[in-house]
Amino acid sequence: MGQASDSGAVGHDAASDSGAVGHDAASDSGHPAASEGDTLVTAGVARLLAMLDAGDVSAEDVVTAHLSRIAEYDGDVNAFLTVLADQALDHARDIDRRRVRGEPLGALAGVPVAVKDVLCTRGEATTCGSRILEGHRPPYDATVVTRLRDADAVMLGKTNCDEFAMGSSTENSAYAVTRNPWDLGRVPGGSSGGSSAAVAAHFAPLAIGTDTGGSIRQPAALCGVVGMKPTYGRVSRYGLIAFASSLDQAGPFGRGVADTAYAYAAISGHDPMDSTSIPEPVPDVREGLDSGVDRLRVGVVVEALGGGVETGVAARVREAAELLGKLGAKIVEVSLPHAKYGIAAYYLIAPSEASSNLARYDGVRYGLRVDGDTAEQMMAATRSTGFGDEVIRRIMIGTYALSAGYYDAYYVSAQRVRTLIIRDYREAFADCDVVLSPTSPSTAFAVGAKADDPLAMYLNDVFTVPASLAGLPALSLPAGLDERGLPVGVQLVAPLLGEAVLFQAANALEAEVGFDPVPRGGNAVHPPDTAHANA
Amino acid sequence: MSLTIDDVRHVANLARLALDADQLERLRDQLGRILEYAEQVSEVATDDVPPTSHPYPLRNVWRADEPRPSLDPDAARATGPAIEDGRFRVPRIIEEDA
C-alpha cells in the first residue's frame, strides 16, 4: 500500500501554509503557544463552518492543517491506508473558489472527513484491509461517499480496518496495525479502528465507519470519541463492501455528539440503489440536540454491570446513569434476558452471511489471482492466499453452519434468538426511551493480547451485538477514563428510527460528563495544542 | 463440539479454500470451541419462535421498469485480474472430451 509514500507527499512545508489562517481565529485561542494549525485541527464542526463562512480561514487552510498533522504523526498511529492529499487539496481549493464566487456550497463545505476502506471510492484504492483486494479501484462511489462529496466534505483518505470488517482490534488488517492514540501500545478497537483513531488523533474532525456487530461503537469507546450506528436501513449500503448484509450499517465518528450529528445528517436517508434502505424521511437530529433529558426515561440494563465488566467501566456507566438522573431523566432498570445469547447468535449469522458474500472473491472479477491448473484450483489458491486467518475462520464457521444437516440447528436457531432479542428490546422500550449500558466490557487492551484467542476477542462485542441483531440505532460516547487513564465508552440504544432521541440524550450526557477528547498520557500520540480543544 | 480433520477438509473444499495441515488442525480446534459456544442458541430457540432474517420490515421493494444509464461494461470488467477481448479470462472449465 502507498501509505508511506502517499502521506509522505505532504511535506512539512504544508504546515507553513496555514499561516494564511485569519488573525481572529488564531487570537481566539487566547494561548500564545497555540499554532494556527492546531486551532484548526482541534475545532469542532460548527466552529470550522463558522470560520469558513466568515472567511477567517479557507478550506485549503483547514485541509492543509489536517494533512500536515497526518504527515507528521500518522507514522505512529497508522490510521490511514491511503492519504488522498492531492485530491483533498483540489477539492478544498474548488470549494474556496466557489465560495468567493457566491456559488452554492454543501452543508459541510470544507470540513475534512476520513472514510473506512470498505466504502467504495471511484478510481481510488479500496482494499477492505485485505490482500485479495490489493490494487482494487472500484468503478463507482458508495452512496455514503457520494453524499459526503455532495455536502462538500473533503475526503482526506481511506482508513485502516480489520480485514473485511471482521475483528475488534484492527489487528486483522493485512497492511498495518492501527495504534490507539491514547496509548500507542494498545489497540484502537475495531473493526473501524482507523476511523476512530483518525478522529481521536485529530487527523480529521469526522470519520465514517461501518458497524456489523459493534465495529463503530467499540472503537469509538476505546479511542474516547463518539461513534454512532444508525437504524439498519437508515444509511445506504450501496458501495459498502458486504460482510453480513442483514447487519452492516455505515455511521459517523466525531469528537463530540453535535459533530457526529452533522455527519449523520449528511449520509442518512433513502437510496433507491439499496433495496433495504428505509423509504422514510429523516428528521434533522440537530434540531432536538439541546432539548435535555428531563422528560426522558433511561433504562439501565441490569445484566450489563455484573461479571466480566472491568470495574473502571462499570463505575463510569453507573456515574453516567446518575448524571442523567441529576439532569432530570427518570432512571429505570430494564432487563434483556436473551442478550446473553447474542454473541452465539451473531457468530453464526454474521459468518453465514459472510461466507456467502465473500464467495465473489474468486480470482476472476476482483483484485488478486493466484494461478492454478483448473478453475477450482485457481479459486482455492487465490482465496487461501488473499484472505487472512480471521476471514478464513469466519468463512469456515459460516460454511459449516449453512451446510447440509446443520442449517436448522445453527443458522435457523440463531435467527430465532434474533427474534427473542428483538422482543426483549420491545419490552424494555415499553418502560424507557433509551437503554444505557457499557459499550465494551473493557478499555483498550494491549496489541497482541487477544490475537491468539478468537472467542475471547468475540466477547468484546457482548454489549454491542444485541442492538445490531435488532437493527436498532445505538451510540457510544466517552464517559471518562479508567484508573489507567484510558477512555471508557457508554452506549445508548434507541428504538427503530429513534436517532433523534439518541442524539438528544447523548448530547445532554456529554455536556454533563465534560470529557476532554485530547489524548494524553505517557504513551499518547503527540497532542495538538489543547488551549482551544473544546471551543 | 468435536470435529474431525475430514470434517474441516470437507468444509474448506465447500468454501474453495486450500488449507495446509497446520491450518486444518488449528481450525479443527478453533471451530470446535466456537461452535460449542454457539450451540447455546439451541437452549432458547424453540420452534414456536419465528426466525428473523432482517431487522426492519420491508417487503416487495420495486423500482420503475425504465431504461437508465448503467456502469460502463469496460469499467466494470477492469476490476478483474485477467481480461481478454472484453471478457474475464479463466483456466479451462470444461474438459475437451466432455
Image (spheres, rainbow, N blue to C red):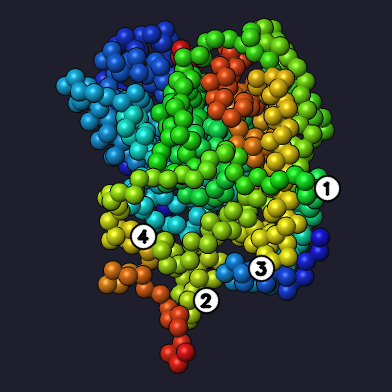
Task: Indicate whether B68 appears above or below A310.
Answer: below
Q: Nearer the viewer, residue A110 or A507?
A: A507
Write down the chain letter for disc 2: A
Residue visible at 80% across and 48% down in the picture = B46
Residue that mark 4 sits on: B79
Write down the chain letter for disc 3: B
SS for dot 4: loop
Residue visible at 37% across and 33% down in the picture = A148
Mark 1 and mark 4: Cα distance apart in space: 45 Å
Mark 2 and mark 4: Cα distance apart in space: 21 Å
Question: What is the residue that sits farthest to the bottom in this orientation?
Answer: B97
The quadrant the N terminus of chain B occupies is bottom right
Which amino acid does the dot numbered 2 rest on?
Gln
Single out the mark in the foreground, 3 or 2. Answer: 3
The answer to whether residue A190 of the structure is visible from this angle is no
The answer to whether residue A530 of the structure is visible from this angle is yes
Residue that mark 1 sits on: B43
Q: Position of residue A187 (x, y in %)?
A: 61, 39
Which amino acid does the dot numbered 3 rest on?
Val
Mark 3 and mark 1: Cα distance apart in space: 25 Å
SS for dot 2: helix
Which amino acid does the dot numbered 1 rest on?
Glu
Residue that mark 2 sits on: A377
Write down the chain letter for disc 1: B
